[in-house]
Image: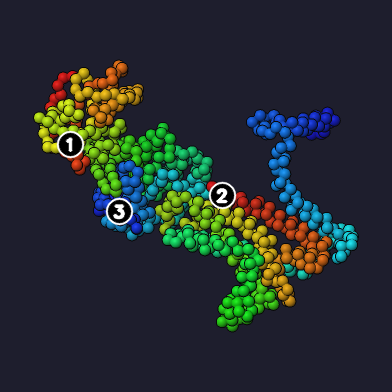
Amino acid sequence: MAHLSLKNVGKTYGGSNQAAVAGVDIEIADGEFIVLVGPSGCGKSTLLRMVAGLETVTDGEIRIGDRVVNQLDPAERDIAMVFQNYALYPHMSVRDNMAYGLKNRKTPKAEIEARVAEAARMLELGPYLDRKPRALSGGQRQRVAMGRAIVRQPAAFLFDEPLSNLDAKLRVTMRMEIRRLQKRLGTTSLYVTHDQLEAMTLADRLVVLNGGRVEQIGAPLEVYRKPASTFVAAFIGSPAMSLLDARFENGQVMVDGHALAPVGNAPGPVTLGLRAEDLRITSTGVPMRVDYVEELGAHRIVHGAIGDQPVAVVDNGGAALAETVHVLVDPAKLHLFETSTGRRMDTRIQAEAVPAQ
Amino acid sequence: MTDTPLRIIETERTLLARFREWWSGETANPVKRVQFDRPLTPWLFILPQMAVVVIFFYWPSVQAVTSSFYIEDPFGFGSTFVGLENYQDALNSSEYMSTAAFTAFFCITVTALALGLGLLLAVKADKVIRGAETYKTLLISVYAIAPPVAGLIGMMFFDMHMGPFTQIAGWFGYELKVGINYWDTAIALITISVWKQIPYNFIFFLSGLQSVPVSVREAALIDTKSGWRRFKDVTLPLLAPTAFFLLIINITYTMFDTFPIIDVIVKDKPANNPMTLVYKVYLDGFKGNDIGGSSAQSVILMVVVALLTVLQFRFLERRVHYG
């Protein structure tokens, strides 16, 4: 177990003049669960593979524990990796799959057996130890891949989208299981996913990546409540935060010519971010055209538009909706971003009670 | 269980029913039912293939087996039934046995070298990134050379007066006399046969290597630092199906398909030169006009190769993991 530190880490592929990953600084405490999240092509897998040693590091420094590992072979880095397609050795039994790495490290036989038995018990793989991977279901294979990582007792676990090959239901169970195991073992973990729900539920801290750069680092709720940019705002949360062009007039933020909420003043146009659950359908407020409604049982999501800008609203009512409804928002829950840079602006917002209704 | 008359009648009845079903194109299971209007249509479709197999395989085989029991007049005026005498003659002849011994040696050496070198080149080519296509094409192109041409090219290399290999051997003070010295000829035969077969093995090993999932290799990279271990424990077992297939193909190649190479090198040479059993079948039959003896030899060869293949499937294939 160890802390992990990435200092100004970057990667440029030969023959390309654009960096795939650039200037990544992350300090990961011992036992912390960090999730790297972002859309495909954002460099999250590349970053993970650089930590694993499967990609060379062209800039900066990666430390695992107290060692700089930039030049070390993957096998020398004291890490274990769980791959998206499990990457089990198809010709080896479950037992041998887990034991192989230990055998190569000249671990005593009795020790190997004990560790494999312990991992098998933890993951409920006992009855399958002598089977080949092809005789296992997807979930079981995933467990074996986890087991292979656990028996190594490494300084860090690296997960490369380990759940994306599983069906939705299994994904939720395995997600909880991974979290439970990690808490129990206390092993520092780096986890890559493009699924923001997985990221939110697993992480101690999230690292949101965009175009090879870190967009925001923070606890899941912090990232959710205070997204640092329009990119993070749109990426984290489901349904995605609605982003609208707005401007200020007389201390009011104006959308499509309607005053939405009193928040203060700022020059020039801004981008207004509205979470679907922060909006309420009322009899007064800004008129919104209703396009379609998603019934989710517990609530429904109303998709529509203010002017010609799309907006989503969570609604708990069951009544049929008119073609045009009115929406209101708590001014404290508005998100404002500079239109030019997309960065969050926090300063000028002053919360005021919303008028009743 | 004894066959009571009743049971026999019953069996006949079911057989008859099955025949009728077959004739009318109907089977008990409607899913399996053949979708042809007339029962003869499917037979028409397989007729060309059947014709080829019968004319070029079964007919000659039957001919070989029958004529192996006869001694034929060299001028074709008649033949005498001699039972197993041809077989006895062949197996008791020291010449036949020494040819068989050489064939075994030749088979093992060529197969081992062709497989080994093919695998080595494939493993190395798999790592090449820049210019990989050119490299592969160069290696594979040898396969396009027809065996007699390969024999001729090889002959040029081993030529007693101007062959580069002869010259190289000369630098080390050795006079290479291909076509005259038994083992010198053997070396030339083996070299050319191996050279001809490497590209074939290379193609299969390379595609076998490329079908090993990248992530499995990466998992191995994390599990062990030693490249040799990764190859031995992970890559090689995953190549086993390819290697097993190639083993059978290579043995068949050394046994039969090296004929043109041997022919080019050994033909019209004066001395006692090495040859394989197949070439001896040809020599005795068509040069020596001993059709009966050569037929017996070819039947023996057929049985040996069939046995070899069965043995390989029985004992080796068990250890092969199919992904």
> Residue type at mark 1?
Val
Could you say where residue A185 lies in the image, as x and y percent from the top left? 34, 43
Could you say where residue A199 lies in the image, as x and y percent from the top left? 32, 39
Residue at 63% across / 67% down in the picture? B149
> Residue type at mark 2?
His
* Location of mark 2 (residue): B321
* Location of mark 3 (residue): A18
The quadrant in which the C terminus of chain A is found is top left
Q: How is the image coloured?
A: rainbow
* Same chain assignment for discs 1 and 3: yes
Residue at 40% across / 36% down in the picture? A171
- Whether residue A166 is visible to the viewer of this picture, yes or no, is yes
Foreground label between 2 and 3 = 3
Report, in whole angstroms, how far the alpha carbon at label 1 lies from the one at label 2: 63 Å
Depth order, front residue of B295/B94: B295
- Local crowd at mark 3 within 10 Å, few (<14), some, or many (≥20)? few
Chain of the residue on which disc 1 is drawn: A
**Circle 1/circle 2 CB separation < 8 Å:** no
Say the numbered circle drawn on residue A270: 1
**Circle 1/circle 3 CB separation < 8 Å:** no
Q: Earlier in the sequence, mark 1 or mark 3?
A: 3
Depth order, front residue of B221/A97: B221
Chain of the residue on which disc 3 is drawn: A
Q: Is residue A116 above or below residue A335?
A: below
Residue lying farthest to the left in this orientation: A250
Depth order, front residue of A144/A297: A297
- Local crowd at mark 2 within 10 Å, few (<14), some, or many (≥20)? some
Report, in whole angstroms, how far the alpha carbon at label 2 lies from the one at label 3: 43 Å
